[in-house]
Image: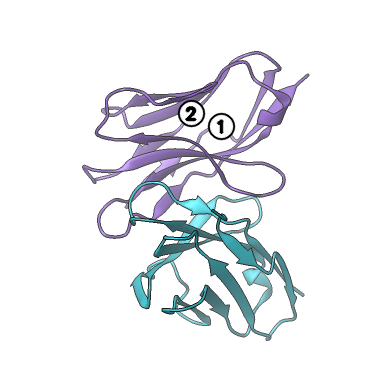
Amino acid sequence: AQTVTQSQPEMSVQEAETVTLSCTYDTSESDYYLFWYKQPPSRQMILVIRQEAYKQQNATENRFSVNFQKAAKSFSLKISDSQLGDAAMYFCASSSGGATNKLIFGTGTLLAVQP
Amino acid sequence: NAGVMQNPRHLVRRRGQEARLRCSPMKGHSHVYWYRQLPEEGLKFMVYLQKENIIDESGMPKERFSAEFPKEGPSILRIQQVVRGDSAAYFCASSPLGVGEQFFGPGTRLTVL
């Protein structure tokens, strides 16, 4: 079965500093996607960044970037120049591929940003 | 282009009543997914539907829960005879192709008294 593991229940970062959130996954699929979603107190799920497994180049979206290590099945999120608005729960997710493409989520990392 | 719409945003039911949650996918999207988020947990897949078809319901409880996505109108997640353990946030997501990114609605928070 496909699994996603986030080993950091909570993290804290100073405003303007950099923080890295960890995620590991396990899948038998050869073609899949990986995602980081942000869930602020409003509970809306907001896509932060996505990575296609067949692409070797790490995805980047402004201050957000990933370190995708396919062999190690690791997919960490780096947030640079952290802002107060980055405070939220962050979920790592993988798509199951195949005919369903359902998302498998980790348990989340609650990020606090200190002013 | 409006995003994924869900209603109601909040729903309160007493034990034994029925809950109906609605989801209108983004325009042009024919793939709908339902997820449940229990308090203090991540999202768990429930069911995947395309127009008029259930493709994967492996995450759906065997009893009391059903889902549909008719040719016309929103997708409906129906929970019969609700119990307190059904209290959760229910999210709908849609995608245009059934692969890659899914776009999430704001969720429906169900509270069972």
Please say if A36 is above or below A69.
below
From the top left corner, tell me how far across and down residue B14 is, in percent. 75, 81
Q: Give the side of residue A99 with respect to residue A37, left or right.
A: left
Disc nearest the viewer among 2 and 1: 2
Give the residue type at disc 1: Gln
Label pair 2/1, CB-CB below 8 angstroms: yes
Q: Which chain is cyan?
A: B
- Quadrant in the picture for residue B82: bottom right
Chain of the residue displaying label 1: A
- Quadrant in the picture for residue B29: bottom left
Q: Give the side of residue A1 with respect to residue A110, left or right.
A: left
Chain A pictured colour: purple
The outermost residue toward the top is A17
Q: Which residue is mark 2?
A: A22
- Quadrant in the picture for residue A100: bottom left
From the top left corner, tell me how far across and down residue B26 is, in percent. 50, 59
From the top left corner, tell me how far across and down residue A115 is, in percent. 78, 19
Dot 2 falls on a residue whose secondary structure is loop
Residue at the location (62% across, 85% down)? B81
Q: Nearer the viewer, residue B2 or B80?
A: B2
Give the class, few, some or many, for how many residues have Cα within 10 Å of label 1's Cα (few <14, many ≥20).
some
| Tag count | 2
Q: Nearer the viewer, residue A100 or B85?
A: A100
Chain of the residue displaying label 2: A
Give the class, few, some or many, for how many residues have Cα within 10 Å of label 2's Cα (few <14, many ≥20).
some
Q: Distance of mark 2 from mark 1, alpha carbons?
A: 7 Å
Q: Earlier in the sequence, mark 2 or mark 1?
A: 1
Q: Which residue is mark 1?
A: A8
Dot 1 falls on a residue whose secondary structure is loop
Please say if B55 is above or below A5.
below
Give the residue type at disc 2: Ser
